[in-house]
Image: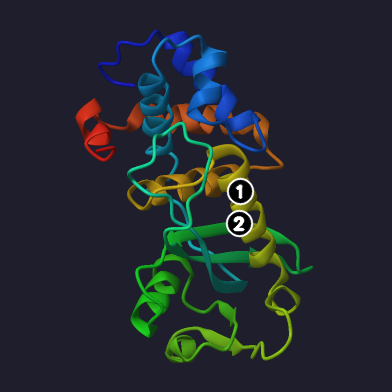
Amino acid sequence: MHRSKLPLRTWFEAIHLMTSHSNGISAEQAQAQLGIRSYKTAWLLLHKLRRAMVDPNRSLLVGLVEVDETEVPLRSKHDPIANHGIPNVGILQIIGAVELDEEGHPCRVRLEPLPDRTGPSVRGFVERNVEVGATVVSNGFPGYRKLAEHRTHVGKVVGNMAAHVLLPWIHRAFSNLKRWFIGTLHGVRKQHLRRYLDEFTFRWNRRRHTSSAFDRLLGLATQMGHASDRDFIKQLA
C-alpha cells in the first residue's frame, strides 16, 4: 500500500473482495468490480495483497497433522494472461498439511510449492510448518520416515486404495485448491504459485471467520514494505 497511486478506497474494496469471496477473485473480475482501467493494475493490486497474506509470526501446526503431495497443470508463460485455456505443458508439484482437532475436524492448512519429491524436500516442509512433538500422518512415502526422530510419524500405505480415503482432509483442501485454480484463475504459472498458495491458505484458514479476515489482511498489508511494479511485472515476461 505504500506509495501507491491507487485511492485508499480501492485498496479497501480489493481487500474486502479477496477476503469475502469464498472462491477468491481473478484480476479480470477485480478490474471490473473495482472500476480499474488497466488489467495490469488490477493484477498487480491483487498480487501485492497476496504478498501480505503470510503472518511472519504465525504458529506451527500442532497435534494430529495430515501431510501429502499433489500435482496441478502448469500454464505456459507464452500464453496471454487473460487466456482461459490451460495448456497441457507440464505440472507443478505442491505439498500440503492440515491440522486436525481432537474430534478429527480440520483447523488450519499449510501449502508450499514442492521442488522435487525427495526426502529432504518433504521433510523440510514438515519441519518448517509442523511443531516438534506433533503426529504426522502421511501416505507412507519413505521420505517421511526420518520425521520419527522429532515427531511421531504414521505412514499409511495407499496401495490400491484411493488416497483421499486414508488422508481425507488434505485431499479435500487439494480438491478445493484445484477447483479455484481452474475455475477462478484459469491456470497458474510457476513463478506466481507460492503467492496463490498463500492466498488460498489465508482464506481457507479463515473460512469460518470472514468478518475478521478483512482486518487481518489490512493490518498485514500496512506492515509490508514498498514493492514496485517492476518486482512483479518482470515475472510476466
Residue 137 location in percent, x, y?
61, 80
Number of numbered tags placed on the structure image: 2
Residue at 40%, 67% in the rendered image: 114
The reply to whether residue 226 is in sight is: no
Residue at 25%, 16% in the rendered image: 3
The reply to whether residue 53 is in sight is: yes
Cβ atoms under marks 1 and 2 closer than 8 Å:
yes
Residue at 24%, 30% in the rendered image: 227
Residue 52 location in percent, x, y?
39, 37
Residue with the mark numbered 2: 108
Residue 159 position by quadrant: bottom right
Q: Secondary structure at mark 1?
A: helix
Residue with the mark numbered 1: 205
Type of the residue with mark 1: Asn
Q: Is residue 237 left or right of residue 157?
A: left
| Residue 30, placed above or below residue 225 | above
Type of the residue with mark 2: Arg
Q: Is residue 204 left or right of residue 60?
A: right
Return the mark for residue 216.
none
Q: Nearer the viewer, residue 172 or 101?
A: 172
Q: Secondary structure at mark 2?
A: strand
In space, the residues marked 1 and 2 are separated at their CA atoms by: 5 Å
Residue 93 location in percent, x, y?
45, 66
- Neighbour tally class for label 2: few under 14, some 14-19, many 20 plus, Cα within 10 Å: some
Residue at 41%, 50% in the rendered image: 193
